[in-house]
């Protein structure tokens, strides 16, 4: 259903980064951030220099969440005209909901890699309000990243795939939103 929604509401214009590449980028980005942030946490709190850890499910969890936030960015920014600070609370609510739902499903199958039960302000050990500042910062980062990815130009020629950037305004905003303006 998401595929139908995005192909009708947000078709990729010629030259825009394809949706599957965006999803892949967001998934890999999420895995990397999870490892880097868990490594930093180990170093700060345990003085441990070992590499952090993550779960393979993080690719799907972070990738799909960032992809949905990316779609929200396009809709709220270009169709509704909402500014960055107005979008932040919606992103944060979506992230908490996403984390809780994924955590509940993964816990059901014994695959949940986190447990916040020892933190105050947690709900069922799956989400905690202590992470609110972090989710706010990551939401802000995601908003900026969505804007940057709109500037990436994807072309395919006989020699292969070429990625380049555009300077200036956001490329193809009206095409992303399916309007003729």
Image: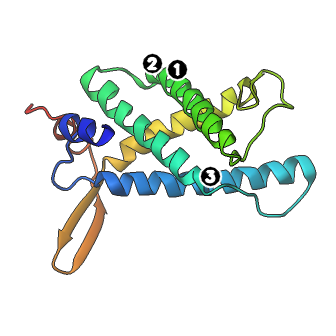
- For the N terminus, the image quarter is top left
Colour setup of the view: rainbow
Seen as rendered, the residue at the extreme left is 180
Q: From what the image shows, is residue 126 above or below residue 164?
A: above
- Pick the residue in front: 114 or 21: 114
Give the x, y percent position of residue 161: 26, 71
Q: Give the residue number, with chain letter if any, for mark 1.
A: 89
- Pick the residue in front: 112 or 154: 112
Q: From what the image shows, is residue 29 above or below residue 74?
A: below
Q: CA distance from mark 1 to mark 2?
A: 7 Å
Mark number for residue 33? 3
Give the x, y percent position of residue 47: 92, 55
Q: Give the residue number, with chain letter if any, for mark 2.
A: 86
Label 3 secondary element = helix
* Label 1 Cα neighbours within 10 Å, binned few <14 / some 14-19 / many ≥20: few
Give the x, y percent position of residue 40: 77, 52
Seen as rendered, the residue at the extreme bottom is 159
Callouts 1 and 2 close, C-beta under 8 Å = yes
Give the mark nearest the N terminus, 1 or 3.
Answer: 3
Q: Residue at x 55, y 33 (%)?
A: 98
- For the C terminus, the image quarter is top left
């Amino acid at each position: 259903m998401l595929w139908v929604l995005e192909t009708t509401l947000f078709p990729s214009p010629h030259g825009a980064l394809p949706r599957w590449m965006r999803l892949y980028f967001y998934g890999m980005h999420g895995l990397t951030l999870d490892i880097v942030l868990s490594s930093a946490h180990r170093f700060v709190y345990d003085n441990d220099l070992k590499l952090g850890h993550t779960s393979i499910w993080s690719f799907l969890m972070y990738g799909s969440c960032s992809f949905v936030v990316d779609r929200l960015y396009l809709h709220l920014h270009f169709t509704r005209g909402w500014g960055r600070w107005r979008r932040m609370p919606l992103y944060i609510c979506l992230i908490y909901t996403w984390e809780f739902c994924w955590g509940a499903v993964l816990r059901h199958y014994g695959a949940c890699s986190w447990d916040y039960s020892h933190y105050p302000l947690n709900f069922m050990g799956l989400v905690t309000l202590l992470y609110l500042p972090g989710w706010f910062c990551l939401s802000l980062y995601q908003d900026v990243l969505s804007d940057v990815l709109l500037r990436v130009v994807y072309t395919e020629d006989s020699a292969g795939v070429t990625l380049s950037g555009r300077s200036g305004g956001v490329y193809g905003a009206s095409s992303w939103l399916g309007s003729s303006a």
